[in-house]
Image: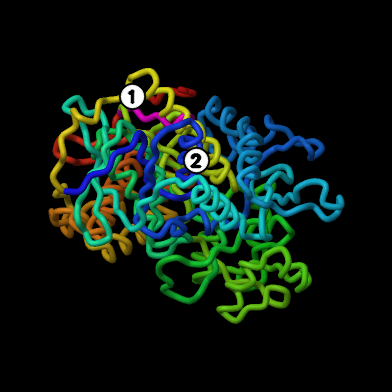
Amino acid sequence: MWEARADLVVVGTGVAGLTAALRARELGLRVLVVTKEAADGGNTRWAQGGVAVVLGDVEGDSTARHVDDTLVAGVGLCDEVATSRIIGDGPAAVGRLRGRGAVFDRDTDTGGDRLARTREGGHTAFRVVHAGGDATGAEVERALLAASRDDRVPMLEHHTAVDTLRTPAGEVAGLLVLDADGTPGVLVAPAVLLATGGLGQLYQATSNPAVATADGVAIALRSGAPVADLEFVQFHPTVLYTGAGARGRCPLVTEAVRGEGAVLVDSRGNRVMAGVHPQEDLAPRDVVSAAITRRMAALGDDHVYLDATHLAAPEFRRRFPTVLAACRTVGVDPSSAPIPVAPAAHFSCGGVVSTVDGRTPVPGLYAAGEVARTGLHGANRLASNSLLEGLVVGTRAAESVAADLALGVLAKPCLAACPPVPVVPVADRDTLQRVMSRYAAIGRDAEGLAVVGSVLDVSAIDRPLGTRALVEDAALTLTARALIAAAAVRQESRGCHVRDDFPATSGEWARSLTVRLTPSGQPMIARPALVKGAA
């Protein structure tokens, strides 16, 4: 095996990973960034809406109000202390991002003196700053990549993270990877930060790119770390409908279109959200997605429509160029005809249990971004809080690593054994996606979840993880098993988790469920409560 050494290995080149790498370099750490695609191939660049942040220049808005909106959206499962810390750090995080070259849209009505704002679902104020109209993620990724190259942050592109190196005491001390040719190598480091993004590829249709295969969740579980809130998968209400049986990444129609006044209508022209929620079309995403799903089922349709025809063509083109380009691929002019849309898998509200400083219960293992469960999102993420979380927790995680190294609390990498390539269960991806989409998406019940478990048990075959495809499929298999384990135990409907056989929300379940692996590698619900607000 080939070998490389660093103080910190960062897995992922999205907003959380690059923010952490840049901050770690500022603190004098030797950093090595690993990504299985090209550096710009992650999920961040697909984010459209913006960054939710209170900058103090919008009358009537406040950090406390932003926190309240987040807690409401999270339906009782947000960690209030963690939420307040992350949102409170937002202005400084956005300031650092702008200092690294990110350019946000200006408010032309004020002569460009302040940043433009939009409002998205669940927000009670216009506080979402954006770039390029609806291309915020692309601008964030561009700025962070440019800063990383200027700062000469070393990157290993097209290298797949397989497993952590661990000491006999279970401390993480490096990473086993496969290079572009499938040759295994070891990255020796006392700290590994998982910033691998989400798990959208568990489902047939998703807003996520092909790289979103839950790699970080699987690595964390196999390293002994717990995951939590995994049953809460947010389905974005408005993904462009491109035809029956759409598969893979589907174009997103940003929530900001509804923020500018667009409304959802069904095939008969009736409003979907009227009378469903006080905020109607700007209700939290779980509410809107569930309402669309119910309406489609009632009418026997597979999509609804987003009517934005009140926006003149020049205004729509200026504000939503990315959405316009996608609509044109299916022959729709949004200024003259409603946009066909349907819900699709979008964001994992849960993940690897970590503090707001990125620390997990496993020494040497850190997590930030979508892969982490900090307590910010609870049972349903508030729109545009994800880029905010990546910026804040990415920074704090790097500072945690520097502090832990200085205190000497991390393992000595020389104590870690070089592991063999793991041999783990791998299910057929197409089969997995079909049963997850049918039985573990919006609307679940005990019988359907049992079907998923049975299908995975029958189809999974133990395979050595010697290729990127096998690593990804193994991660999807393990994560699917962990997700359905939690979904089966949670006998209620809350946020993104909708149980058709338990439609009510119960105070008994106002707690997070954590999942660990048994010694035989099976996901198991761990009952003890999580520590709240830990830092």
Of the residues shown, which amino acid type is indicated by label 2? Leu
Q: Which residues are magenta?
A: 356-362
Q: How far apart are the two marked residues, 2 and 1, measured between alpha carbons?
A: 36 Å
Q: Residue at x 52, y 28 (%)?
A: 82
- What's the magenta bit mostly, secondary-structure-wise? loop
Residue in view at x 32 percent, y 49 percent: 215
Residue under numbered circle 1: 528
Report whether residue 447 is seen: no
Q: Helix, strand or loop at disc 2?
A: helix
Question: Is residue 358 magenta-colored?
Answer: yes
Please state which of residues 365 and 120 is positioned toward the viewer in this rendering.
365
Mark 1 lies on a secondary structure that is loop
Q: Which residue is mark 2?
A: 22
**Does the CB distance between marks 2 and 1 fall below 8 Å?**
no
Q: Position of residue 220 (x, y in %)?
A: 30, 39
Amino acid type shown at disc 1: Pro
Q: Nearer the viewer, mark 2 or mark 1?
A: 2
Kindly indicate the quadrant of the structure image that contains residue 17: top left
Above/below status of 127 relative to 85 = below
**Residue 208: x and y, percent?**
45, 59
From the viewer's perspective, tell me whether residue 303 is left or right of residue 197. Answer: right
User: Which of the two discs, 2 and 1, labels the residue nearer the N terminus?
Assistant: 2
User: Which image quadrant for residue 255?
Assistant: bottom right
Q: Residue at x 49, y 38 (%)?
A: 394
